[in-house]
Amino acid sequence: MSAEFITSPLASPERTTPGTITLAALLNILWRRRLIVVLLTGLGVAAGIVYGLVVTPLYRATAQIRPGITAFTETGGPVREWALKDITRFFQRRLYLPSVRRQMGWGPEQGYPVIHAEFIARGAQNIQGGNVVTLETLSPSPDEARRILEAAIVAFNEYAEADTVASGFFLTRRGLEIQIRQLQNDVDKLDNEKAHLGIEIDKQKAALKVVDGERQRLELELEKVDQDNAYRDRVGQQSEREAAAALVGLERVEARLRNLPAEAPGAGARRDSLMMSLTDDPLRSWLLATHRQSDATAVSEMVLGALEVRERAFRDQARADSLRHVIEMSGYYVKDLRLKRTGELDKEYAEIQAELSDLQLQRDQELVSQRVELKQQVLAKQAQLRALSPLERIGVTDTSDHPVRPRRLRAVVILGFLGLLGSICLAFVWEYLAVNRDIILAHRAGRG
């Protein structure tokens, strides 16, 4: 700054020396040019206010992601193939644009969203950083900002899933799908086996009914034997009564023969032959003693009647004895039948009942347990299949409640401050031009 500027009337000659600048002189300049300072500062503040009102407000959406599970170890542990730098490079190169435009329904000239991706690669003193990538974007609508980030995540998944030949993600997903179908087939087989067991159970129940029918048939057979024995007993009693009645008749015949008169002449030989046919010695003796006193014809008829009565009594008694024997043998048969048939039927019934219980146990417990186990395996495989993703979202996409751009207060402060600085500079320049105008114009005239 020249000496002429320093010796301005605004400066006090008593307090200044040539070649020095004092604070009072500077403040005097600003005070004299205060209108410029106020106007330019006000214009800066006004520009900041207008900027905040004119510029479209933008909302921020933030999402955190990390490399997703693309495969599983033999023990079920997750395997993450993608590196953090590969994910950030995808967003830095804006490879998501075509997919995001398609998902948002934008044309090539409409949407050009900018997504920032960053992660902490390594902390201070070689401390390993996190495995989380933070995605941020700005949009006039909070909902649109959130949908942009979600579409960008889908775009990366589409990009990563495009390799369907050697990708571990693809192979793992196909393998899990095959395992799930196999497990579901096993569940269907269990349903078929359950139906088969139901048929076998029905067969065993039918077999139990057959055994019950055999028992009823046995009871009917035993009842029939009892009825037959009752009939035989009645017939035997009747035969005994007839035999007793025949013996009574025989006694009457014998009594009558004892009371016959002496035998007629010439009939002795016939009576002798008839009497010799009698087997009862007392009767024969009696006839021999009285044959001379009886009539030959009457004796012959009585002897024949006695023989017939004796034969009938013998036959009736034999029948009664035979029936009693049959009844007695039937009793042994009934006991043997009860012992054998009842034991066999009880054994068969117990075996069928045991088989039926085993089948019901298989159907109601074992098959149910196997089905539950297979269902759990299916759910586990489905959970692994759902967990497969090149990118894994952490939490939810967060959006700001208020616009983050423009920052009105900061814009007002910055533009106001710039206006203040500009006004101070302009005030000094204006003061310089005002004080040294004659010299500046003289120089220009001399050049001219």
Image (cartoon, rainbow, N blue to C red):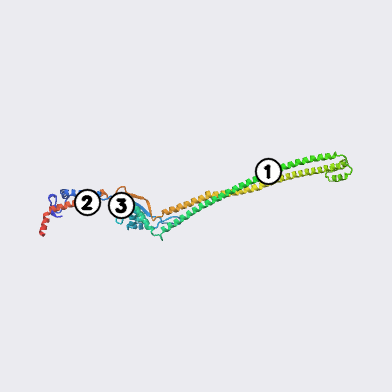
Residue located 61% across and 49% down the image: 348
Residue located 15% across and 52% down the image: 430
Identity of the amino acid at label 1?
Answer: Gln
Pick whichever of labels 2 and 1 is earlier in the sequence: 1
Q: Secondary structure at mark 1?
A: helix
Query: Mark 3, mark 2: which one is toward the viewer?
Result: 3
Is 269 or 349 nearer to us in this picture? Answer: 269
Give above or below for 179 relative to 240. below
Relative placement, left or right, of 238 versus 380 is: right
Label 1 belongs to which residue? 227
Is 265 or 130 nearer to us in this picture? Answer: 265
Label 2 belongs to which residue? 418
- How far apart marks 3 and 2 lie (CA) works out to 27 Å
- How far apart marks 1 and 3 lie (CA) works out to 107 Å
| Position of residue 417 measured from the top left corner of the image (x, y, whole percent) | 22, 50
| Position of residue 295 measured from the top left corner of the image (x, y, whole percent) | 86, 41
Q: Which image quadrant is residue 216 in?
A: top right
Label 3 belongs to which residue? 138
Q: Residues within 10 Å of mark 3 (few under 14, many from 20)?
A: many
Pick whichever of labels 3 and 2 is earlier in the sequence: 3
Identity of the amino acid at label 2?
Answer: Leu
Relative placement, left or right, of 439 versus 302 is: left
Q: Secondary structure at mark 2?
A: helix
Pick whichever of labels 1 and 3 is earlier in the sequence: 3
- How far apart marks 2 and 1 lie (CA) works out to 132 Å
